[in-house]
Image (cartoon, coloured by chain):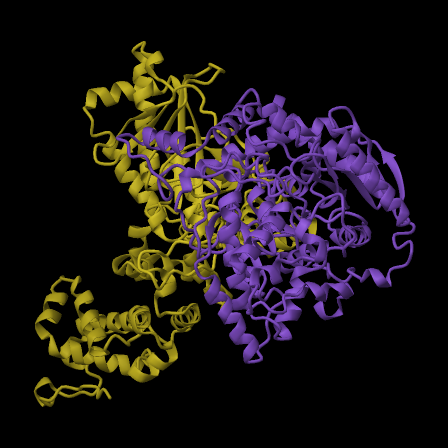
Amino acid sequence: MLSTLQQPPRSLSRIPLHLSSIKPLRSFFTVGSASVSASASQDQSSPPSSQILTVRHSLLSRQITATQLAESYLSRLSLTEPHLHSFLHISDTLLRDAQLIDRKIETGEDVGPLAGVFVGVKDNICTDDMPSTGGSRILENYKAPYDATAVRRVKEKHGILIGKTNLDEFGMGSTTEASSFQVTANPWDLSRVPGGSSGGSAAAVSARQCMVSLGSDTGGSVRQPASFCGVVGLKPTYGRVSRFGLMAYASSLDVIGCFGTSVADTGILLHAISGHDRFDATSSNREVPDFTSQFSSINLMESKPLKGLKVGLIRETLEDGVDNGVKSAISGAASHLEELGCTVTEVSLPSFSLGLPAYYILASSESSSNLSRYDGVRYGNQIFAESLNSLHGDSRSKGFGPEVQMRILMGTYALSAGYYDAYYKRAQQVRTLVRKSFKEALDDNDILISPVAPSAAYKIGEKKNDPLAMYAGDIMTVNVNLAGVPALVLPCGFVEGGPAGLPVGLQMIGAAFDEVKLLKIGHIFEQTLQGCRFIPPLVADDLVVAKDVFRG
Amino acid sequence: MKSSSSSTTTTTHTPTATQEKQQNSQIKISPQTRTKTIDKLIKDYEAIIGIETHVQLSTLTKAFCGCPYNYGAQPNTTICPVCMGLPGSLPVLNSKVIEFAVKLGLALNCNLSLNSKFDRKQYFYPDLPKGYQISQFDIPIATNGYVDLDLPVEFGGGHRRFGITRVHMEEDAGKLLHSGNGRVPLLEIVSEPDMRNGIEAAEYAAEIQRVVRFLGISNGNMQEGSLRCDVNVSIRPIGQSEFGTKVEIKNLNSFSSVNRAIDFEISRQVLLHSQGQGNSIVQETRLWEEGAQKTITMRKKEGLSDYRYFPEPDLPEVILKKEYVDSIQNSLPELPEMKRRRYESMGLSMQDVLFLANDINVAVFFDATIAKGADVKLATNWIMGDIAAYTKNEKVSINNIKLTPQELAELIASIKGGTISGKIGKEILFELIAKGGTVKGMIEEKNLVQIVDPAEIEKMVDKVLLENPKQLEQYHAGKTKLQGYFAGQVMKLSKGKANPGLLNKILQQKLNATRRSGFKSCLGVGLSLEELPNELYTIDWP
């Protein structure tokens, strides 16, 4: 599959040719000539290319070794982590894993499609060789005895886990501030949140701390941080990827998703982890199509490569409360799609505004149940007590953070006898409506588009004491989870803010199990978008520092 | 024939029924006066009994965690992430559970829900790793059925039909982690409150056990907890339409304890009621104490507990296709009720019917014997008599003995056809049971063919009479009972092979003859007593 993939011809120039020589950091992290001063305003350089394919090509053509790559990523981490705090844990077997790949390549063994690809994994996804805390004090130092299916599949394809990324505790939050351990900064502006809950995975990819990463998306936790950090985020159809090994937040909404710096990379990663899993009864039996076959080189594209496609712009996502900067970025993206040959029309999803409260009731209800296993009895932190009730109670009240406790309480309330019909049952009815309206809209249109969030990344602490404002920010994304359909977020523009502007993402929503179409449209959109490079200033800053270091 | 049927009479009761009877009388060991008053009082009340039965599907050890993670290399870690409820683990339902539920639903004459689902029942308990139990709440897989049964003859007999409210699937919440077998799947069967006394309840439970065993979905063993009964008992004065306060009884480890616990609880409630203390009967869970033969309070219920049920999002809906249900329906084995009606139509008494149909293994053995052409009544007698005695003594199941139905049929035919005597048959039977082999082989090997030649038998009779002149004299003097002695001696001489009918006939003739014509002339050979050789005639056994 990979060999058929056409690469943008200029991508080779980005391959670090002299990594082992004098300027390893610079040579590898130079992402095009203009990247040293990457910003929104000025850039005529090439569109993003697949890091996965670039690395594969470099490894197989012996231009670089996986060990060299690992070393440069480790030095990069040591430079960037003190500013970003994307990771809760860095793999201590990184070099060994890389050497293993090198040995395989040396001996001519077949290597998997992710060989030498450094993958960040959100810390609510279980790994058997690193701690898995879910960002929660109650699981501090907890080590799972098994790999999540998605992780196992990454490893089977020779991907290398670089570390476990920070998140809002158990995925509950939209800023990553609700982590029990640390606050992650946005690589575009260190005073801003990276979004959440997969903020660590998004920031790590954005700052090139890893090539791709896994996140989880219950109500937008992959898409919103992708938008905030200027990376590509893919939320697959519910059931496309096994949830086995993903710490459950809201089981009927949770999906493992992918981050990358290009659409192609998220597609390749998704392909690696997709497919039925007998350990997850909700994983789909559907055949996994080749998500990557659509990635053609821009040189081969026609002038109107998306001719005839119908795109629906969701009217309800552009109403009051959405920043003007975001609105104009989205209308710019819509124009771009039109230039590519699409017909863009506004569509209305009347049930859209009902989705947010329904989501918070369903997600809280399920989480109140899913989190009851953390009782301090079998694993995790136990607060010793004389009576069983106090053992449960103390372990939970000291182990869970305030946001999680609030959601457990809300969910417990919503499921209680006498309230079930008014809350949970009603929310399920709303969910049916939402699904139906998405189905109808997607019967009429190839894809739907919308912003990902009402604003770009906001300041750390800005919404910490205003949960309702934070929840309101999820309005663009939660409906997609209620409907179970896939969505792709890719950077489409900038708004003012921070040292170099703040990225804004475009959300493309597709029909269930039609990730192929999303990836195809997303890839063409990305490859043809002019004038925007989404490389955060931190990357450029580091390169300057690195330069100095090596000169000194 | 006589021999076998005589031994049957001691083992006609079903094992349960025998116990019930004995233990029933144990209840009444209490002071006689009190018992009498209660007996009198009970007549004015009606007991309402409903039963919740949990059946462990024993063939599947890991139905909610098809987990291959093998921790065999590390000691004491044979549990998988799923049954430990580890973060990230998910339940997966084994399709066998659905198949078994459908089987049971059909066997209990229920309506099947073609679309059912699982729900989470939530509460905290150290033994509940996930903090909830996967169960079925508002849409169980089967509803609205019934079970037919025949009460044991010793308890007055009679046919009963008890309603089944629902059958649903759930995981066993009572299994500790260190069981190492994961969370075993259960079927819970809820009855209608149709039972009125301990015997009916015990027989209901026994019928459920039979049904699950006939279906092959559980071993139904009560001692091991594979089949557990929680009983709800309330009483009301006869004529009153509203129900009394319901009390739940747990810790019932046998059918007889079901029976005794209920009868105890009825007496307790009746006594309280009759003493004007009816309001001290409260909604509670009581434990049956086997040692003390009484129920004691385990926990009082403080209002309704809120389990915050909601649909289990980790498991898809259970959708049954009509063809699937039909194929299961068509593959159902003959169920206990059908067996009983068939045996009844074969002319067997209810006692025989119940004995044969109560134990699946016995029924299978019987059916196979009949299928080999054996006489129905004779086969029944052998199975209920000597074979049952043996299996009971040796504590083995009928399917573990070496005797095959084929050989039992052969044995019956050999006796009926006169090849061997009943007595020899019985001897062979025990050897066949213990060591196996064939009837034919054994007859040949031991030269056991019955002696039906009158001349040969006559020879032996003569010999015995000759050797026992004293007894013969006594016989003629009027001690006619001695005929039995002579017959015994002849039989002994023939090594049990003489045809008993022929033997008796010839012996009678000879005895009559000796009385009439004197001792000597009875010897057809005309020799005088003194002329006889000293050596006795013996048969040379190989």
Residue B95 in picture, x, y percent from top left: 56, 53
- The answer to whether residue B470 is left or right of residue B457 is left
Classify residue B477 by image quadrant.
bottom left
Residue A97 in picture, x, y percent from top left: 49, 66
Image quarter where the N terminus of chain B lies is bottom left
Colour yellow, chain: B
Image quarter where the C terminus of chain B lies is bottom left
At a point 29% along the width and 82% down the height, the residue shown is B446
Residue found farthest to the top: B276
Asked whether the viewer can see residue B347, the reply is: no
Residue B204 in picture, x, y percent from top left: 44, 39
Query: Taking B134 as reference, is B346 above or below it?
Result: below
- The answer to whether residue B155 is left or right of residue A178 is left
Q: Nearer the viewer, residue B356 or A433?
A: A433
- The answer to whether residue B514 is left or right of residue B326 is left
Query: Taking B274 as reference, is B49 above or below it?
Result: below
Colour purple, chain: A
Please count the marks in the image: 0
Classify residue A394 by image quadrant.
top left
Residue A81 in picture, x, y percent from top left: 50, 48
Residue found farthest to the front: A552
- The answer to whether residue A276 is left or right of residue B452 is right
Q: Nearer the viewer, residue A424 or A352?
A: A352
Asked whether the viewer can see residue A252, the reply is: yes
At a point 36% along the width and 43% down the height, the residue shown is A378
Q: Nearer the viewer, residue A503 or A542?
A: A542
Classify residue B455 by image quadrant.
bottom left
